[in-house]
Amino acid sequence: MAVTADIGLIGLGTMGSALALNIAENAGPIAVWNRTTATTRAFHAEAGALAASITPCETLEALVAAIRPPRAIILMVPAGQPVDDQLAALAPYLSPDDLVIDAGNANFHDTNRRARAGLPFRFLGMGVSGGEEGARHGPAIMGGGAKADWDRIAPILTAIAASYQGAPCADWMGPEGAGHFVKTVHNGIEYADMQMIAEVYGLMRDGLGLQAPAMAEAFGQWNTGPLQSYLIEISAQVAAATDPLTGAAMLDVILDKAGQKGTGRWTAIEAQHLSAPIPVIEAAVAARNMSARLDERVAGEALFGPAPQAVTGGLGLPDLHDALLAGKILCYAQGFSMTAAAGPAFGWDLQLPAIARVWRAGCIIRSALLDAMALALAEDPARSLMLAPTFAAELQRCVPSLRRVVSVAALQGHSVPALSAGLAWFDAMRTRRGTANMIQAQRDFFGAHGFDRLDGADSHHGPWGTSA
């Protein structure tokens, strides 16, 4: 088979198909292969004018033969064992200088393992964010692996990435699984951002008695100010949408039960290993898990009565806006703090300003705040974002609203776990004299009285003296 392509792609699902079209349109000719040959043929047949830049292949051997050496092949297959299976299947056909790029939603520990496994070819892990729309028209790309391998493929990746004021939202994050780690933190922040918006939506609906069109208008207005972001934008759109079958607001017919693919959970798990407090993200993961227990929630309402009541005390949309802004700042501060902790833990030199710049466009959490965050992190990467002058000023202005919202929500039966967690973290991190001395005193007491001894014998040490 003649060489026809600069790069190859395996996996023509929703994301793979979109990314292949993006490459064909913006970065040059591409060869594609899918495990199901009919899918490959249909993809090529439906590619329109871009079909001339796409070589459909029916075997792995043909795919490899179609790519100009040293070859680069992007994997867009499900995370986990399918990636290992695909790497093994490619091994007989590739040379040591060929490069395979896992662009799926991989657990970064798997990427670390693969990078260290002595594969018979080069390997990169690459986080890609933006969903189908981003993959087709410009995602945010977070690369991990050898810098030389990233540099080799960077012209293609920067050509297909989103851009912010002319700068591509694609960059090398560090070795091994660094790119997939950064994508994991991105997804954790995404969980939290969505949860806080949902909590504000609940207060609008059940606390203020707003109908969906009024909520759509509020979110639309918020998207013109400091809360401007993709998630606020689509919140306005979904609040305005109607069910084509009933004419009712779409939000009123969607089941109150949110699922998850696991990446937010990975963020929470890894934060515990890093001793990095991210309570807003953890609360968001827990909220999704609670939402799935719909039968228990129905039983709880039958026993105790519905919790949410109309809010009182003059709480209104301006308070909700500022509470959401404060919560968002606090959540991002936690996410970047977790990322900073990962650097020394894994031996990576993670550049926080570069991460913020990559997230400015293309990805799900893109927002107006990220450019200012990139500047603040460049000024002092070691400083928490909540202490950076720009964001400290916003918090001083907005936290009173966050405090009112959380207080009124608690009094009136509204569950706002992520906003509450953000406020609790803020109060803990702004307080010199905390309460951990009581915990430490209790631990000392346990030790002095033998409770840390497996054999049940008394201890005779510590500030409490001899146990009775």
Image (cartoon, helix red, strand yellow):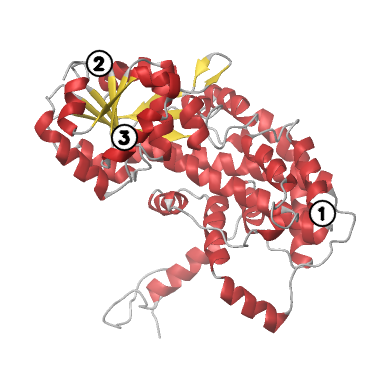
* 34, above or below 22, in the image: below
Q: Which image quadrant is residue 148 in? A: top left
Numbered disc 2: secondary structure = loop
Q: Is residue 349 visible?
A: no
Q: Residues within 10 Å of mark 2 (few under 14, many from 20)?
A: some
Q: Which labelled disc corresponds to residue 211?
A: 1
**Callout 1: 10 Å neighbours few (<14), some, many (20+)?**
some
- Residue 70 seen anywhere in this rendered image of the structure: yes
Q: Earlier in the sequence, mark 3 or mark 2?
A: 2
Hey, what amino acid is under mark 2? Thr
Residue in the foreground of this view, choosing between 400 and 299: 299
Q: Position of residue 351 (x, y in %)?
A: 43, 27
Residue under pointer 2: 4
Residue 19, position as x, y percentages in the image: 41, 29
Q: Is residue 184 left or right of residue 193?
A: left
Tell me the residue at 25%/43% (across/down).
83
